[in-house]
Amino acid sequence: MNFFGKECVENNLKITPQRTEIYKELLKAKDHPSADIMYKRVRKNLPNISFDTVYRTLMSFSEIGIADIVEGYGDPKRFDPDIRKHHHLRCIKCGNIIDFRCELYDDIEIPEEIKKEFDVTKKRVIFEGICRKCKSK
Ligand SMILES: [Zn+2]
Ligand SMILES: [Zn+2]
């Protein structure tokens, strides 16, 4: 939470009880929640908050770099509190996004022809498939 306060101050984002609560809830999340899911969770402690506030807050978190928007493939935007290097397993059945770490992929080499066409700002490996829960159904 110190990190949150510091980043907010540095980026001129006012620290409000609502923002603090939303960030706390996002930090707890291991499932890369959508704004909709975040809204449901945050409402338990802040019953009067609007979906719009939750959505805009998550967007400003991503703007100042304390959260990530991750690949959604046309689904609603999904948010990730973990801004360290990591990679994703994405279940094509339930849409679950699971984190994994692999140093080898962190340093993945960008092919020259891509470098010419495209400025890569982030490298993430995504495996798609069927998660354990869906497989056992
Ligand atoms: Zn699944
Ligand atoms: Zn992640």
Image (tube, rainbow, N blue to C red):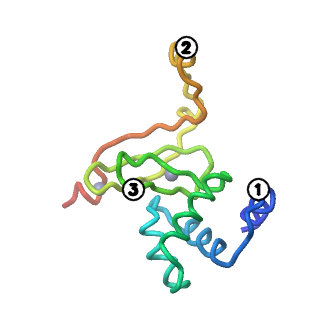
Q: Is residue 26 above or below residue 110?
A: below
Q: Nearer the viewer, residue 89 or 63?
A: 63
Amino acid type of the residue that numbered disc 3 sits on in the rendered structure: Pro
Secondary structure of residue under mark 3:
loop
Secondary structure of residue under mark 1:
loop
Q: Nearer the viewer, residue 82 or 102?
A: 82
Secondary structure of residue under mark 2:
helix
Q: Which mark is residue 76?
A: 3
At 68% from the left edge and 53% from the top edge, which residue is drawn? Answer: 64
Q: Is residue 64 left or right of residue 38?
A: right
Q: Are marks 3 and 1 in contact (CB under 8 Å)?
A: no
Around disc 2, counting alpha carbons within 10 Å, would you say few (fewer than 14), some (14 to 19), or many (20 or more)?
few
Amino acid type of the residue that numbered disc 1 sits on in the rendered structure: Asn
Mark-to-mark CA distance, 1 and 2: 35 Å
Q: Is residue 66 left or right of residue 32?
A: right
Q: Is residue 85 above or below residue 136?
A: above
Q: Which residue is mark 1?
A: 11
Q: Quadrant of the C terminus?
A: bottom left
Q: Where residue 53 appears, x then y in whole percent?
A: 55, 71
Mark-to-mark CA distance, 2 and 3: 33 Å
Q: Where residue 126 appears, x then y in whole percent?
A: 42, 40
Q: Is residue 124 above or below residue 59?
A: above
Q: Nearer the viewer, mark 1 or mark 2?
A: 1
Q: Where residue 48 appears, x then y in whole percent?
A: 52, 85
The reply to whether the residue tagged 1 has its Cβ within 8 angstroms of ligand 2 is no
Q: Which residue is mark 2?
A: 112
Q: Which numbered disc flags the more N-terminal residue, 1 or 2?
A: 1
Q: Is residue 34 left or right of residue 26?
A: left
Q: Where residue 57 appears, x then y in whole percent?
A: 59, 65
Mark-to-mark CA distance, 3 and 1: 26 Å
At 38% from the left edge and 40% from the top edge, which residue is drawn? Answer: 127
Amino acid type of the residue that numbered disc 2 sits on in the rendered structure: Glu
